[in-house]
Image (cartoon, rainbow, N blue to C red):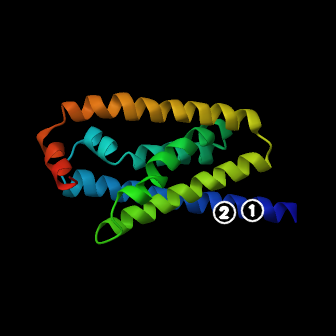
Amino acid sequence: MIETKKVLGRRIELLLVALMGVNIFWGALVFMGFLGLDVLGWLIMNICSPSEMVAIIGILTKKRLISSISIPLLLRFGGLGLFIFSWSGFMLQGQLNHIIMVLTSIYILWASCKARAWKDLFIGIVIGVAVVVLVDFLIFPLYFANAPPKVKELLEYYK
Protein backbone atom coordinates (compact mmCIF):
# COMPACT_ATOMS: atom_id res chain seq x y z
CA MET A 1 0.00 0.00 0.00
CA ILE A 2 2.83 2.42 0.86
CA GLU A 3 4.50 1.72 -2.48
CA THR A 4 1.23 2.52 -4.28
CA LYS A 5 1.02 5.88 -2.50
CA LYS A 6 4.60 6.72 -3.52
CA VAL A 7 3.88 5.84 -7.15
CA LEU A 8 0.67 7.87 -7.12
CA GLY A 9 2.47 10.83 -5.54
CA ARG A 10 5.21 10.69 -8.16
CA ARG A 11 2.62 10.49 -10.94
CA ILE A 12 0.90 13.60 -9.59
CA GLU A 13 4.25 15.39 -9.47
CA LEU A 14 5.09 14.38 -13.03
CA LEU A 15 1.64 15.43 -14.24
CA LEU A 16 2.06 18.86 -12.63
CA VAL A 17 5.57 19.16 -14.09
CA ALA A 18 4.29 18.23 -17.56
CA LEU A 19 1.40 20.71 -17.38
CA MET A 20 3.69 23.50 -16.19
CA GLY A 21 6.23 22.59 -18.88
CA VAL A 22 3.57 22.89 -21.58
CA ASN A 23 2.54 26.26 -20.16
CA ILE A 24 6.14 27.49 -20.12
CA PHE A 25 6.54 26.43 -23.74
CA TRP A 26 3.25 28.09 -24.69
CA GLY A 27 4.24 31.30 -22.88
CA ALA A 28 7.58 31.39 -24.69
CA LEU A 29 5.84 30.82 -28.01
CA VAL A 30 3.30 33.58 -27.41
CA PHE A 31 5.59 36.22 -25.93
CA MET A 32 8.71 35.62 -28.01
CA GLY A 33 7.20 34.09 -31.15
CA PHE A 34 3.92 35.92 -31.67
CA LEU A 35 4.55 39.15 -29.74
CA GLY A 36 8.25 39.47 -30.63
CA LEU A 37 9.71 40.04 -27.16
CA ASP A 38 13.22 39.04 -26.18
CA VAL A 39 13.88 36.46 -23.43
CA LEU A 40 13.98 39.07 -20.66
CA GLY A 41 10.73 40.61 -21.90
CA TRP A 42 9.10 37.18 -21.90
CA LEU A 43 10.32 36.36 -18.38
CA ILE A 44 9.13 39.71 -17.01
CA MET A 45 5.81 39.93 -18.86
CA ASN A 46 5.09 36.25 -18.18
CA ILE A 47 6.47 35.98 -14.65
CA CYS A 48 4.49 32.76 -14.29
CA SER A 49 7.12 30.91 -16.35
CA PRO A 50 10.10 31.56 -14.04
CA SER A 51 7.88 30.74 -11.04
CA GLU A 52 6.95 27.43 -12.63
CA MET A 53 10.60 26.74 -13.50
CA VAL A 54 11.50 26.96 -9.81
CA ALA A 55 8.69 24.52 -8.95
CA ILE A 56 9.74 22.12 -11.71
CA ILE A 57 13.36 22.13 -10.56
CA GLY A 58 12.30 21.49 -6.96
CA ILE A 59 9.94 18.67 -7.89
CA LEU A 60 12.27 16.92 -10.33
CA THR A 61 15.29 17.12 -8.01
CA LYS A 62 13.12 16.21 -4.99
CA LYS A 63 14.57 19.19 -3.10
CA ARG A 64 11.85 20.34 -0.72
CA LEU A 65 13.58 23.64 -0.02
CA ILE A 66 13.50 24.61 -3.72
CA SER A 67 9.92 23.40 -4.05
CA SER A 68 8.96 25.43 -0.99
CA ILE A 69 10.55 28.56 -2.44
CA SER A 70 8.11 28.25 -5.33
CA ILE A 71 5.00 28.29 -3.10
CA PRO A 72 4.81 32.09 -2.63
CA LEU A 73 5.78 32.63 -6.27
CA LEU A 74 3.07 30.30 -7.55
CA LEU A 75 0.45 31.81 -5.25
CA ARG A 76 1.40 35.45 -5.95
CA PHE A 77 1.72 35.23 -9.71
CA GLY A 78 -0.69 32.36 -10.33
CA GLY A 79 -3.27 32.78 -7.58
CA LEU A 80 -3.62 36.53 -7.92
CA GLY A 81 -3.61 36.17 -11.71
CA LEU A 82 -6.98 34.46 -11.35
CA PHE A 83 -8.41 37.79 -10.19
CA ILE A 84 -6.38 40.19 -12.33
CA PHE A 85 -6.81 38.79 -15.83
CA SER A 86 -9.92 38.29 -17.92
CA TRP A 87 -11.79 34.98 -18.07
CA SER A 88 -12.58 35.29 -21.77
CA GLY A 89 -10.93 34.83 -25.14
CA PHE A 90 -7.21 34.19 -25.32
CA MET A 91 -6.81 34.60 -21.55
CA LEU A 92 -8.59 31.30 -20.84
CA GLN A 93 -5.33 29.42 -21.42
CA GLY A 94 -3.57 31.82 -19.04
CA GLN A 95 -6.24 31.23 -16.43
CA LEU A 96 -5.83 27.48 -16.81
CA ASN A 97 -2.13 28.02 -16.18
CA HIS A 98 -2.94 30.03 -13.03
CA ILE A 99 -5.15 27.19 -11.76
CA ILE A 100 -2.32 24.70 -12.36
CA MET A 101 0.06 26.98 -10.45
CA VAL A 102 -2.29 27.15 -7.45
CA LEU A 103 -2.81 23.37 -7.50
CA THR A 104 0.96 22.85 -7.65
CA SER A 105 1.53 25.12 -4.65
CA ILE A 106 -1.15 23.25 -2.70
CA TYR A 107 0.43 19.91 -3.63
CA ILE A 108 3.93 21.07 -2.61
CA LEU A 109 2.58 22.38 0.70
CA TRP A 110 0.67 19.13 1.34
CA ALA A 111 3.63 16.91 0.40
CA SER A 112 6.02 18.92 2.60
CA CYS A 113 3.65 18.78 5.57
CA LYS A 114 3.08 15.06 5.04
CA ALA A 115 6.85 14.49 5.03
CA ARG A 116 7.17 16.74 8.10
CA ALA A 117 9.78 18.80 6.28
CA TRP A 118 8.99 21.83 8.44
CA LYS A 119 12.43 23.43 8.27
CA ASP A 120 12.65 23.28 4.47
CA LEU A 121 9.06 24.46 4.19
CA PHE A 122 9.57 27.44 6.50
CA ILE A 123 12.91 28.53 5.04
CA GLY A 124 11.62 28.05 1.49
CA ILE A 125 8.51 30.12 2.10
CA VAL A 126 10.56 32.90 3.71
CA ILE A 127 12.95 32.95 0.74
CA GLY A 128 10.00 32.81 -1.68
CA VAL A 129 8.30 35.78 0.02
CA ALA A 130 11.58 37.71 -0.16
CA VAL A 131 11.79 36.97 -3.89
CA VAL A 132 8.19 38.12 -4.42
CA VAL A 133 8.91 41.39 -2.58
CA LEU A 134 12.12 41.87 -4.58
CA VAL A 135 10.33 41.26 -7.88
CA ASP A 136 7.30 43.42 -7.05
CA PHE A 137 9.12 46.37 -5.55
CA LEU A 138 12.48 46.43 -7.34
CA ILE A 139 12.69 44.34 -10.50
CA PHE A 140 9.29 45.22 -11.99
CA PRO A 141 9.62 48.99 -11.37
CA LEU A 142 13.17 49.08 -12.74
CA TYR A 143 12.24 47.08 -15.84
CA PHE A 144 9.00 48.86 -16.64
CA ALA A 145 10.47 52.34 -16.05
CA ASN A 146 12.81 51.71 -18.99
CA ALA A 147 10.80 49.08 -20.86
CA PRO A 148 11.43 48.53 -24.57
CA PRO A 149 8.84 50.10 -26.92
CA LYS A 150 7.26 46.72 -27.70
CA VAL A 151 6.62 46.09 -23.99
CA LYS A 152 5.16 49.58 -23.53
CA GLU A 153 2.86 48.89 -26.47
CA LEU A 154 1.66 45.67 -24.83
CA LEU A 155 1.11 47.44 -21.51
CA GLU A 156 -1.18 49.95 -23.24
CA TYR A 157 -3.41 47.03 -24.18
CA TYR A 158 -3.98 46.18 -20.51
CA LYS A 159 -4.90 49.73 -19.39
Circle 1 residue: 7
- Residue 81 lies left or right of residue 4; in this view the side is left
Quick check: marks 1 and 2 in contact, CB under 8 Å? Answer: yes
- Percent position of residue 48, x then y: 41, 49
Identify whether 88 is placed above or below 52: below
Q: Residue at x 21, y 46 (%)?
A: 37
Question: Residue 149's mark?
Answer: none
Task: Count numbered badges in the picture.
Answer: 2
Which residue reaches farthest right? Answer: 1
- Residue 145 lies left or right of residue 104; in this view the side is left
Circle 2 residue: 11
Question: How far apart in space, not on screen, are marks 1 and 2 (Cα)?
Answer: 6 Å
- Residue 108 lies left or right of residue 24; in this view the side is right
Identify whether 129 is placed above or below 116: above
Q: Nearer the viewer, residue 81 or 63?
A: 81
Q: Nearer the viewer, residue 44 or 6?
A: 44
Few, some or many residues within 10 Å of mark 2 (<14, 14–19, 20+): few
Which residue reaches farthest bottom? Answer: 89
Q: Nearer the viewer, residue 13 or 124?
A: 124
- Percent position of residue 25, x then y: 37, 56
Q: Identity of the amino acid at label 1? A: Val
Could one spot residue 62 in this view of the protein? yes
Few, some or many residues within 10 Å of mark 1 (<14, 14–19, 20+): few
Identify whether 105 is placed above or below 19: above
Q: Identity of the amino acid at label 2? A: Arg
Image quadrant for the N terminus?
Answer: bottom right
Residue 7, quarter of picture:
bottom right
- Percent position of residue 125, x then y: 61, 36
Q: Residue at x 76, y 47 (%)?
A: 113
- Percent position of residue 43, x then y: 33, 42
Could one spot residue 36 in this view of the protein? no
Please, what secondary structure does the residue beneath circle 2 have? helix
